[in-house]
Image (cartoon, helix red, strand yellow):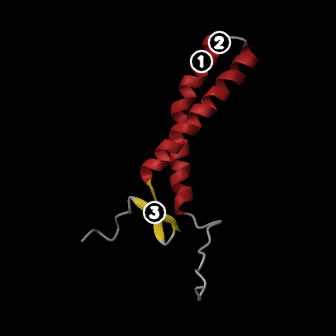
Amino acid sequence: MGNKNERPQEKQIGTVNGAPIVERRYRSVLKAISWRVTGTIDTMVVSYIITGNLTFAASIGFFEVFTKMALYYAHERVWSRLKVGLEVKQPPDYSI
């Protein structure tokens, strides 16, 4: 028996053909990494356009990748607990 205060490592987010779809915490980590790669490239390009200095643009991108990845992960975990915009679809009471 687990502690009732323990948080589950996965969360059901839907079903496919009656089988539950669960979201595991590592999915949030993978999403954070993929989003940060995209965001960091954008930050470096914008920094280069503004400064004209590739070294400066790269250093800005290197620093912000770590801070924003941590912020995104925390943001994702908060949103995974919110019920805003989620709806439980009940199956029809009949079958054909």
Instruction: Pick whichever, 56 or 44, lies toward us.
Output: 44
Instruction: Give the vertical position of 35 relative to 16 (above or below).
Output: above
Q: Where is residue 22 in the image (x, y as percent from the top left)?
A: 46, 61
The quadrant of the rendering that contains the N terminus is: bottom left
Instruction: Give the vertical position of 56 relative to 24 (above or below).
Output: above
Residue type indicated by callout 3 = Lys
Q: Which mark is residue 5?
A: none
Residue type indicated by callout 2 = Leu
The quadrant of the rendering that contains the C terminus is: bottom right
Q: Which residue is drawn at 58% across and 80% down?
A: 91
Disc with the residue nearer the chain's start (1 vs 3)? 3
Q: Which of marks 2 and 3 is in front?
A: 3
Instruction: Pick whichever, 90 or 92, lies toward us.
Output: 92
Query: In this rendering, would 47 be left or right of 65?
Result: right
Q: Which residue is drawn at 60% across and 75% down?
A: 89
Mark 3 secondary-structure assignment: strand
Query: In this rendering, would 86 be left or right of 12?
Result: right
Q: How crowded is mark 1: few (under 14 residues within 10 Å), some or many (20 or more)?
A: some
The reply to whether callout 2 and callout 1 are in contact (CB within 8 Å) is yes
Q: Position of residue 77 (x, y in %)?
A: 50, 54
Residue type indicated by callout 1 = Ala
Disc with the residue nearer the chain's start (2 vs 3)? 3
Tell how many labels: 3
**Quarter of image, res 83:** bottom right
Q: Residues within 10 Å of mark 3 (few under 14, many from 20)?
A: some
Residue under label 3 = 11
Q: Position of residue 63 (x, y in %)?
A: 54, 25
Q: Residue 58 carries which label?
A: 1
Q: Residue furthest right?
A: 50
The reply to whether callout 2 and callout 3 are in contact (CB within 8 Å) is no
Residue under label 2 = 54
